[in-house]
Image (spheres, rainbow, N blue to C red):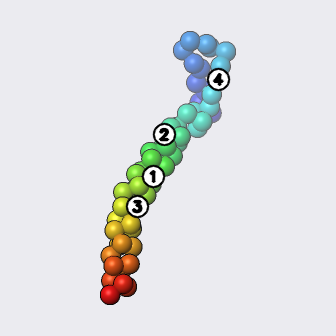
Amino acid sequence: MTVRYQADDPRVVAREDDVGGGGAVLLAMTAGVGALTFLLLPVMAAVQAVRRRLSRR
């Protein structure tokens, strides 16, 4: 098992498996899904407006 120490405080220890950066991947995925959601909202609103306009005829 590989053990890493923080440079500024050698008393703090973390396993190699715990510092893999999985949190950054999760944050990037969450931000991407949020951006896609907000980009799709105007498209969905436009489709709904066209449907309402067509149903009035």
Vertical placement of residue 25 versus 39, above or below:
above
Tell me the tag on residue 34.
1
Q: Which of marks 4 and 2 is nearer the N terminus?
A: 4
Q: What's the residue at 62%, 31% (across, down)? A: 15
Give the residue drawn at x 38%, y 66%: 45
Answer with left or right where residue 34 lies relative to residue 12. left
| Mark carried by residue 24 | 2
For marks 2 and 3, give the one nearer the viewer.
Answer: 3
Q: Distance between the residues labelled 2 and 3?
A: 26 Å
Q: How crowded is mark 3: few (under 14 residues within 10 Å), some or many (20 or more)?
A: few
The foreground one among 24 and 1 is 24
Instruction: Give the residue type at disc 2.
Output: Ala
Q: Quadrant of the C terminus?
A: bottom left
Q: Which of marks 1 and 3 is nearer the N terminus?
A: 1
**First in sequence: mark 1 vs mark 2:** 2
Please state which amino acid type lies under the numbered disc 4. Answer: Val
Identify the residue at horizontal 36%, vertical 72% (top origin): 49
Figure quadrant of the N terminus: top right
Which of label 1 and label 3 is nearer to you?
A: 3
Of the pair 4 and 52, the residue shown nearer to us: 52
- Look at the numbered discs 2 and 3 and tell me whether their residues touch, using CB distance below 8 Å: no
Q: Are marks 4 and 2 in contact (CB under 8 Å)?
A: no
Q: Earlier in the sequence, mark 3 or mark 4?
A: 4
The answer for how far apart the CA atoms under marks 1 and 2 are is: 15 Å
Residue matched to label 3? 41
Mark-to-mark CA distance, 3 and 4: 45 Å
Quote the CA–CA distance across marks 1 and 3: 11 Å
- Percent coordinates x, y for residue 34 in the rendering: 45, 52
Mark 4 highlights which residue? Answer: 13
Q: Earlier in the sequence, mark 1 or mark 4?
A: 4
Give the foreground label among 1 and 2: 1
